[in-house]
Amino acid sequence: MKATLRILLIVVAVVVSVVAAGTFVPRPLFAPETSDAVGQTRRILVLSNPIHTDIAIPLDKETRADYAVLGASGIPVADPAAEWLVIGWGGRAFYLETPIWGDLRPMPLFRALTVDRSVMHVDVAGSIDETHPAIRSFDLQPAEFRNLSDFIQASFVRDGREMVVIPGAGYGAYDQFFEAHGRFNAFLGCNTWTARALRSAGIRTGWWNPLPQTLGMSLDLFN
């Protein structure tokens, strides 16, 4: 019994150490040199809930054109009332089959803890209260914003130019799920995808951020 407890304590200590290192060791390790280039900045948002993060990009003239292809799937990117495009990446089974906690079932949870195919979830939003504690905002230079948008768009599986929609999988009237590149697991999940996307835009994160809480902490520390 004592040996089992000792092993359990060692495992817990290792997990805590790895998560702490992933949070407090920045990625990249050294802050990149700031560019002298100036231009009209674009604000993006990182939206967090207890287990998941999304990225919201502003729907302006440029992004409405860049993401106009989403309109064919029913996402109203051209609607003037839509101010933000909200995008996230995640595991197929858990994402599609668990819209709320009350829908949690063993198999999607098992797939989320092992290996699963991935999907993109896209929604639109009107005005967002940026003072909410679960929201962080960042102002990007044009090149940084373009890098972020390129990263996001490269995450979609495409058939020609069209993003491959998953029929009937949306949560509501204006959102959709799409096939995505990459495999989902508990170590490389939705929040590590968000971190990679942010790093593509020059935003520093922790070295490994599997949880929204550790990602948010690292964003606050290093930016």
Image (tube, rainbow, N blue to C red):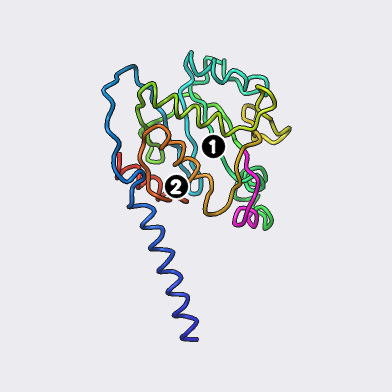
The relative height of residue 38 versus residue 216 in the rendered view (above or below) is above
Membership of 114 in magenta stretch: yes
Query: Is residue 118 magenta-colored?
Result: yes
For the magenta stretch, what is the residue range? 109-119
Please state the horizontal and vertical placement of residue 99, each as a whole percent of the image.
62, 43
Q: What residue type is labelled 1?
A: Gly
Residue that badge 2 annotates: 212
Is residue 214 shown left or right of residue 65? Answer: left
Which amino acid, mark 2? Pro
Instruction: Look at 59% across and 48% down and name the residue there.
Output: 184
Using the image, determine if residue 27 lies above or below residue 13: above
Residue at which label 1 appears: 88
Category of crowding for the residue at label 2, using alpha-carbon neighbours closer than 10 angstroms: few (below 14), some (14–19), many (at least 20): many
The tag earlier along the polypeptide, 1 or 2, is 1
53 on left or right of 102: left
Counting labels gives: 2
The quadrant of the rendering that contains the C terminus is top left
Image position, residue 127 (x, y; %) = 45, 24
Residue 145 position within the rendered picture, expressed as x and y whole percent measured from the top left: 42, 25
Q: Which residue lies furthest to the bottom in this view?
A: 1
